Amino acid sequence: MQDQNETAAARQTQSAAGDPPANPAANDPAPPVPSLEELLEKAETAAQEHRDAWLRAKADADNIRKRAQSDLANAHKYALENFSAELIPVRDSLEAALASQNATPAALRSGVELTLKQLMLAFEKFSIREINPLGEKFDPHKHQSINLVESDAEPNTVVGVLQKGYSLNDRILRPALVSIAKPKASA
């Protein structure tokens, strides 16, 4: 019993000195270290999984690229589909006017006016705007000068429109052909 008391006293002395208590698990054998073959097999499996994931991602990217190219090609191919659908009735009206054998000039004029109205509605629907610059200052971005005309109007003012221009969403499709005022020559 005295031995037990001495052992307990020794433990208290160690605790008081700040030494950690003895760990009974420290005497257990260390966990098994995997062999090099196991580590290699694990690394090869992980590498194969990463390769498979990379191949899937690459295939997905290729499919997205091909789909985008196809969508773009279709967008270019069918971009005018809606506009074309609006122009078909205009053509039908013109063909009906030409097919009429006994139309009077007044009836033809009325038909042409209705056809022009259909065309103007189609242009309006697709933001095609008319450029009729009579009386405006000459703008080389919107107008094409055909000639200079002596006029009482301010110089560089459009005094005659030979052909109207058109714009699509602020982009000039065709500039207006115009005559521009120049000062009268002094005698």
Image (cartoon, rainbow, N blue to C red):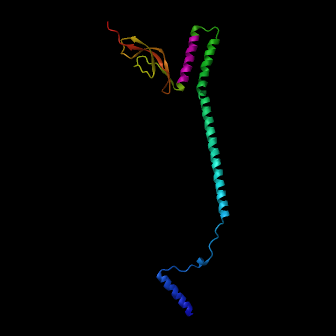
Q: Main secondary structure of the magenta part?
A: helix
* Left or right side of 45 for 10: left
Q: Quadrant of residue 182?
A: top left
Position in image of residue 36 (x %, y %): 65, 64
User: Which residue shows up at 54% across the image and 26% down it?
Assistant: 125
- How many marks the image carries: the answer is 0
- What range is drawn magenta here? 108-123
User: Which residue shows up at 62% across the image and 47% down it?
Assistant: 57
Near-viewer residue (60 or 130): 60
Residue farthest toward the front in the current orientation of the protein: 36
Residue 165 belongs to magenta span = no
Quadrant of the image containing the C terminus: top left
Quadrant of the image containing the N terminus: bottom right
Position in image of residue 123 (x %, y %): 54, 23
In this rendering, the answer to whether 41 lies above or below 61 is below
Residue farthest toward the top in the current orientation of the protein: 187
User: Which residue shows up at 56% across the image and 13% down it?
Assistant: 110
In this rendering, the answer to whether 5 lies above or below 33 is below
In this rendering, the answer to whether 13 lies above or below 137 is below
Q: Quadrant of residue 72?
A: top right
User: Which residue shows up at 67% across the image and 63% down it?
Assistant: 37
Residue farthest toward the left in the current orientation of the protein: 187
Position in image of residue 7 (x %, y %): 54, 88
Position in image of residue 35 (x %, y %): 66, 66
Near-viewer residue (164 or 8): 8
